[in-house]
Image (cartoon, rainbow, N blue to C red):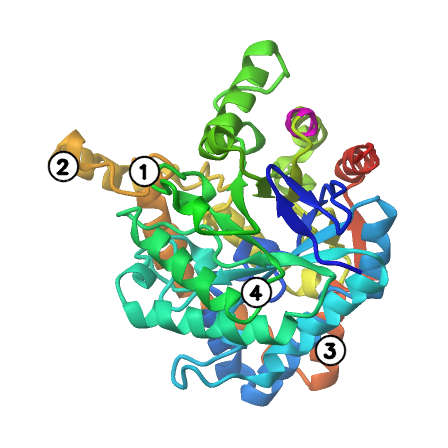
Amino acid sequence: MAFIKVSGTKLVDANGEEIILRGAGLGGWMNMENFITGYPGCEFQIRAGLADVVGKDKSEFFFDKFLEYFFEDADAAFFKSLGLNCIRLPFNYRHFEDDMNPRVLKPEGFKHLDRVIDICAKHGIYTILDLHTAPGGQNTDWHSDAGTHIANFWIHKDFQDRVIWLWGELAEHYKDNTWIAGYNPLNEPTDPYHTRVIDFYDRVYQAIRAIDPNHALFFDGNTFASDFSHFGDMHKKWENAAYSIHDYSVFGFPSSPQQYVSNDEQKRRLKRSYEKKREWMDQRGLCVWNGEWGPVYARQEYDGQNTESINEERYKVLKDQLDIYNQDRLSWSIWLYKDIGFQGMVYVSRDTPYMKLFDKFLAKKHRLAIDAWGADDTHIRDVYKPLTDLIVKEVPEEYRNIYPSPVWKFTDRIGRLSRNILVSEFLIKEWAEHFKGKSEEELDVIAQSFRFDKCLFRDGLNKVLRENASLPTA
């Protein structure tokens, strides 16, 4: 079996035949995210919080079993049954090195990554390795696991040096694995100067190529994989490289400016947003990969009788985006495969021990809107209005839009700092206390809630994916 390569605008096999990668991201697994698995704040915070409550050994036991059960053979078999052929594997740098012991490889970091790569290969599924968090945080959001809205990765060179070192270790370990379609060196960078990210990509390209000349590289655009305006002619230096956009549409979220009815104007807006993100690549005849996209979905416990109608609207967005992608024969990875019911293709049943344990806590999280992703601040909007009004009164309009605007609007920034960082911090201990007094056997049972046979299926989403995955690729 040969490596997948980039050839012009296409991904190809050893015979030069086009391969279109269609799949999903395994978000919430080796890089846990709060809306995916139900905790507050960032992963490093809840790991520390749980260790404080149950002890280091039990905490590590629980998270290890969680990683094991989150994706197993049955998951891969289901994924393949839909006709999908690629899984993006986001992972946290903390699995491979410790901030207090940098550049010392943790061999156990490969344990679950190797396991899932091998399971996927067994079922004929390619994988793409995605460094989703970097030391210091490469972006301003919670999923870079930095606990801050400042992307310090771009301020401290040593953070960048550590990632160069890590990709060297990863390239050495995986250089001969042809079931890995490629490496995604850094998820969603937000470099306010737009130039440091280019310099870093050039460094990581050289470091990987010194060890691994064969795997394709997928470079995210700056500002959450949307902006390639400063990449210039760097593509001329990088062989076997594709460029990754993340094509989320506002129509797929609770903040949608209008009901989505799939009219011509709405479809035009979908297409224009997509085309703008890939414009730099199209002007140069380069390969594009859509590394993340997809709507979120209503839940009966929060949206009641409107749940079905909201989700039917979201499926229209899904279908219209796929129509656009199919016209371009685009490779894509929808976000995401598994969660607790907001966006996943499969999701943990509310009848499981984990969901029963956190039933009231999850309702409280939703009411307080402490997760940034798809936040509905209806219940607490009035609480934060005085803060917004104060800033509007005291700060001239021209100073309010701070990078990464316009992706982060003025009000979004207030919410992210006040709710998603500050308030969420006060709930971490409360989350961890749910595990107090649990034995290893009980922790194992709770972790098993994430097994495939404990999950339900988002049939509308999976039907659309199956229909599009089966489209001809040649």
> Would you name the residue on which mark 2 appears?
395
Residue at image mark 3? 444
Q: Secondary structure at mark 4?
A: strand
- Distance of mark 4 from mark 1, alpha carbons? 26 Å
Q: Earlier in the sequence, mark 3 or mark 2?
A: 2
Secondary element at image label 3: helix
| Dot 2: element | loop
Q: Which residue is found at the position 69% from the left and 70% from the top?
A: 176
Q: Is residue 96 above or below residue 36?
A: below
Residues in magenta? 321-327
Q: Residue placed at 60% from the left, 67% from the top? A: 30
Q: Nearer the viewer, residue 436 or 110?
A: 110
Q: Amino acid at mark 4?
A: Phe
Cα separation between marks 3 and 4: 22 Å
Position of 11 compared to 392: left or right?
right
Instruction: Kindly indicate whether the residue at mark 1 contacts the one at mark 2 (C-beta within 8 angstroms).
Output: no
- 3 or 4: mark nearer the eye: 4
Query: Which quadrant does the C terminus fall into?
Result: top right
Q: Which mark is residue 91?
A: 4
Q: Nearer the viewer, residue 266 or 167?
A: 167
Give the mark nearer the N terminus: 3 vs 4: 4
